[in-house]
Image (cartoon, helix red, strand yellow):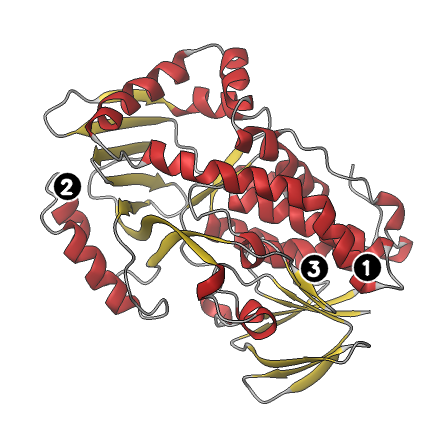
Amino acid sequence: MKVLISGASVAGPVLAHWLHRYGFEPTLVERTPAGRHGLGGHAVDLFSSAADITRRMGCWDAIEAARTRLDAMTIERFGKRPVEVDLSRMYAGISSRHVEILRGELTRILYAATRDTAEYVFGDSIAAVHDDGAGVDVTFESGTQRRFDLVIGADGLHSNVRRLAFGPEEPMLRPLGGYLAVFSMPDVFGLGNHTLSHFSVGKLVGIYGVHQTGQVRAGFLFRAPELRYDYRDKDEQKALLVKEFRDYGWKVPQLLEHLVPAEDFYFDSIAQITLDTWHRGRIGLVGDAGYCPGPAVGGGTSLAVMAAYILAGELAAARSDLPSGLRNYERTIRPVVEQSRRFAPKVMRTIIPAGPLALRLMPTAAATLAKLPTSVQRFIWSQNSVGKALSSVPMPDYSDLVQPERGQPVT
């Protein structure tokens, strides 16, 4: 059976890998040209269940080698003494199997793992879909027309497939009141494996080293009323960021000097996608396209890996009735999605201080937590819904569905 997947970042390649193993023929279409695919992105987390899935894909060694390797963070505030946080101890407390990796590095690894078993079409996108009940006719922006048994949108917060099959984005978008911007620049501060963060009310600026390139990533999070902008217009977004931070002080003037030439600039709202259902007929959604819990605050990358794995398994189990597989996937993943979605606003309130009290308490709390025994840290994290949702969710076993000619399951 032929499955078209729109989007080749995280959920798309994971889904393609497992669909191939179960005997399907996946095709991925990605708007970004091949030469720019996988560039940029902020640091993301893979927690236990997602880590186990990538290990079974044979990607874990490459992922561990590409981890950020950030070992410590200095938190600064205007007029306050810096606070030091041991990141290695904190990560150990979050999950027994956890890795932080740049999203672009993860995309690169997943592409390398699937490029020989899935068809990739770069520099194109879906222009129209027509589901006649027996299959889906797809017209691409290039003018090509093809027919598939199923179409899956794995194309992120501003999903093209969701727009075509479910309607305009605005009624489904739930802004959380914040924005995120990230770009690469030279390591003018000599950070290495260190993270430097500065907090003020409603704002966070972070700088962390990238060992693969010797550069650093500069990240900005801030609270603001809803901003109107074109999410594809990078120059407009850069201007918005400058307007928001031009009077901030600290090291920000130096950071903004490197903003204009940044080719991997990313900017978007911290928002959730809320839908009653993630499938219609033979068209479905996975990852941020269907239920984005909020960029940088909801564990969306781990959720995308887990959901893609489950989607492939349920489609394979319902092979003769793919719409039934979509329904079973939705029923299986919904509790995890809802927990992650509930937790995201809490994370945002924690990492972007809303008022003076939060600004005063947060750094000390972070440093204290990192010093606690690992077992105590894990207990504290387990009380948060994101900990329950993304660190300890057992994944279904679909290994008996693997087609022998497609290779044996990795154990």
Left or right: residue 392 versus residue 408 is: left
In the rendered image, the quadrant that contains the C terminus is top right
Q: Earlier in the sequence, mark 2 or mark 3?
A: 3
Q: Are marks 1 and 2 in contact (CB under 8 Å)?
A: no
Q: Amino acid at mark 2?
A: Lys
- Cα separation, mark 1 vs mark 3, equals 19 Å
- What residue sits right under mark 1 in the picture? 324
Q: Secondary structure beneath disc 3?
A: helix
81 w.r.t. 143: above or below: above
Q: Secondary structure beneath disc 1?
A: helix
Q: Nearer the viewer, mark 1 or mark 2?
A: 1
Residue at the location (28% across, 39% down)?
206
Q: Amino acid at mark 1?
A: Ser
Q: Nearer the viewer, residue 210 or 164?
A: 164
Q: Secondary structure beneath disc 2?
A: loop
Specify whether residue 168 is in view.
yes
What percent of the width, then of the height, locates residue 225? 26, 53
Q: Earlier in the sequence, mark 1 or mark 3?
A: 3
What percent of the width, then of the height, locates residue 147? 74, 81
- What residue sits right under mark 2 in the picture? 251
Q: Nearer the viewer, mark 1 or mark 3?
A: 1
Left or right: residue 394 versus residue 384 is: right
Q: Amino acid at mark 3?
A: Ala
- Cα separation, mark 1 vs mark 2, equals 54 Å
- What residue sits right under mark 3 in the picture? 16
Left or right: residue 175 versus residue 373 is: left
In the rendered image, the quadrant that contains the N terminus is bottom right
What percent of the width, then of the height, locates residue 385? 54, 30
Q: Nearer the viewer, residue 124 or 192?
A: 124
What percent of the width, then of the height, locates residue 28? 64, 68
176 w.r.t. 340: above or below: below
